[in-house]
Amino acid sequence: VRPLGPPLRIKRRTAWELAHRPRLDEIGAGLRRLAAQADEDAARQELDRALRAAVAVLPRSPYYAACLRQHGVAVGDLRGLADLTALPMLDRAAYRSAWDALPTGDLAGAVVVKSSGSTGEPVSVVREPFEQLHMWGVLGFWLTQLGLTLPPRPRIVLLDPLPSALEYSVRVRVVGDGRGALHRLSLLHPRVRERLERADPAVIFGDPVGLHWWGRVRPRARPKLLLTSAQHFAPTDRAVISDPVVNYYATTETGPLAWECLTTAGVFHVLAPDVWLESVAGELVVTRLRPTVVPLLRYRTGDRGHVARHACPCGFHGWSIHGLDGRHACAFVRPDGASVDAWQLAALFKQVALDAFQLEQTARDRFVLRALPFADEPRLLADLDEALRRLGWTARTIARAPVAPPVGAKPEPFRRSFA
Ligand SMILES: [Zn+2]
């Protein structure tokens, strides 16, 4: 086991967040309003209005200004969702080359993040300061939708499985009573369980790795809500956790898009009016309707699913994704016969595009890692070996094949080739 340094504490100024509270409250209110809107015409009218506001800024985006000219479309032609087809779709390759021409210009405080996403090479994404807080507005919506209220001074824990083992604590001014805190805890630090219990969080953000750990260790804490994203989350994982879990679908380029119904597994409710999703030939295509300095219209996610409007038994009214297939589910089999969700290992490969590697289990104790040689490879292999050991492979062999993984319509970073 690699020695870990002392926990890193970062104190960050958070007073700037307060100025965004009204906008965050608006995000939550909009999501609640649409989720309760049983009248489809009224819902569409609201989305059409949101689209008209969103496209008003397009002439200030170099990419979209050129796009409108090229296709002979005026902003005034885009009156509603039905007019969107006048615009071409934006695929990942085009985004990758045009990322710095998308923003409208007001980029004070913006950051650039890299995404490996579920398809293809890393993409640079510009995020304005508000986008870094946006999730708090969506969290507020989920809490009310599930009938949950936060206690005073709510603590929020981010359970981090990454090898960087970065930890910090900051105040959070825009959640609950504004006196809460966010603690990022690394699963790799000793005593993470005790520290989590001491934090006694009301909300836990994790991923399937963190949630597996939670289900296994069962810390003495009663969060109101756990959240997971970014990777495949199986119904069997949900079954072992007694607290409510929101499994949301997001991409780095777009932010959160939808969340899996807690009543009907496999149905993802779309976060309108923040976003609008079309299904074009079975592919999910996103238009961001909330105002941002990085407009995004008809962005091809590369994920598959179809979108339909319905009144859900959970009380949600609106559009939902059915048959969402962004990531191939894959269960590895341990030497003792137990099944393990292979996507628990995805965090280790965060710096590698998902179509640039494939970890295949060829026998109960044998794996093959296919990838062209990449930077930091010895460390990743050591981390992978250690992760497999912790997951129950007391004996394991990882063969290294320095070849590109097979090319398919959708990357399959994890696969098992024996019954
Ligand atoms: Zn539902």
Image (cartoon, rainbow, N blue to C red):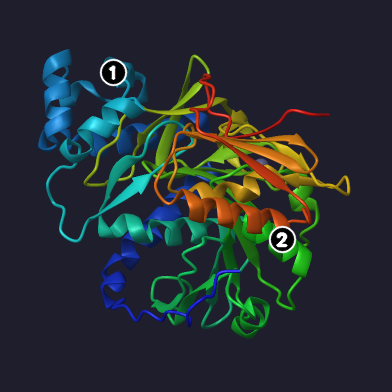
- 184 w.r.t. 336: above or below: below
Looking at the rendering, the quadrant in which ligand 1 lies is top right
Residue 129 versus residue 271 in the image, above or below: below
- Do residues under tags 1 and 2 come within 8 Å of each other at their CB atoms? no
**Which of these two is toward me, 301 or 225?**
301
Residue 277 at what x, y percent from top left? 45, 30
Quarter occupied by residue 315: top right
Mark 2 residue element: helix
x then y, percent, for residue 232:
63, 42
**Mark 1 vs 2, N-terminal side:** 1
98 vs 409, left or right, is: left
* Numbered circle sitting on residue 390: 2
Left or right side of 343 for 241: right
Q: Residue 394 lies in what quarter of the image?
A: bottom right
Label 1, label 2: how far apart the Cα atoms are: 47 Å
Which amino acid, mark 1? Answer: Pro
Residue where numbered disc 1 is placed: 88
Q: Nearer the viewer, mark 1 or mark 2?
A: 2
| Residue 236 in sight here | yes
Q: Residue at 18% of width from left, 40% of height from top?
A: 100
Q: Nearer the viewer, residue 185 or 162?
A: 162
- At 44% from the left and 55% from the top, the residue drawn is 29
Q: Is residue 264 visible?
A: no
- Left/right placement of residue 172 relative to residue 149 reads left
User: Looking at the picture, does residue 242 appear above or below residue 305?
Assistant: below
